[in-house]
Image (cartoon, rainbow, N blue to C red):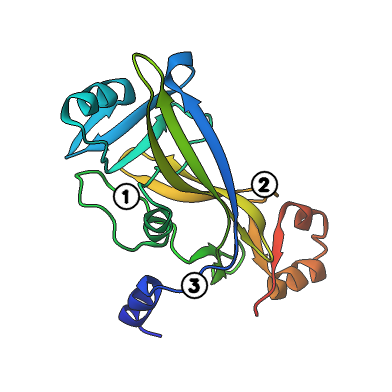
Amino acid sequence: MGFLDRFFKSKARVEEPPFETVERTISLDERQHKVVVRIHGRELFAEDFFRACREAGDYSFGRFYLHGEDLPKTHCAPSLEQAIDWFRGRGAPNDGYGTLVWGDAATYNCKICGAALEFPLRINKVEKLTVYTVLPEYQAIVGWRVLEVGNDLLGPGIPTKVLTQYKTFPIIRWESQKKMYVHQSCREKMMEMGKEEELAEYLILAPA
């Protein structure tokens, strides 16, 4: 399969298998979270966003995210469909903010031979997040984001990100906490060399 074939295949809309929806509410009045809203190319704290909305009578937004989460998660989209599209790499908003894309599969390289294997990402959970205030009156916005993914071999994982000196990369924090991978064939070679103890650190990836 050529590069262009893979590119367009990854963007094609496919029906998602059933997933769990987790609902959560955040009260700005309790001041436990800082919520940043992206609107018309600008970023506003949610308190300032709501003040502007009262004056304009318009609560539309591009995205919002929680500032300072212990484990940074995906941004919240205005709709469930958009949240899934952004996660998969479709229809990213042109709002002056880079959109991280996890796509349809996670790719890992064997630590011994370097060969790559792709593992499909299934969406396990999405979050419906309501941010609200009751001061001076009730105001709320609702956002959606992918909260957990899964793979039959790798298990469940949380989409998050890692920041390098120059760029931010989307990654999956797997519940198994395994970070090193070897092919089944490389495992057999290590066994022949008497390196069974080292294999405890690896997740064995058997080609399909």
Q: Earlier in the sequence, mark 3 or mark 2?
A: 3
In the image, taking residue 196 as reference, residue 117 lies left or right, namely left
Q: Classify mark 2: residues with Cα within 10 Å, few (<14), some (14-19) or many (20+).
A: few
The amino acid sitting under disc 3 is Glu
Q: Name which quarter of the figure residue 97 lies in.
A: top left
Q: Residue drawn 17% across and 40% down?
A: 40
**Secondary structure of the residue carrying numbered label 1:** loop
Q: Residue under circle 3? A: 15
Rounded to the nearest angstrom, the CA distance separating label 3 from label 2 is 29 Å
Measured Cα–Cα span from mark 1 to mark 3: 22 Å
Point 52% across, 45% down: residue: 127
Task: Indicate the secondary structure of the residue bearing disc 3.
Answer: loop
In the shown orientation, is residue 15 left or right of residue 49? right
What residue sits right under mark 1 in the picture? 99
Q: Earlier in the sequence, mark 1 or mark 2?
A: 1
Residue underneath mark 2: 177
Three-letter amino acid code at the position of disc 1: Thr
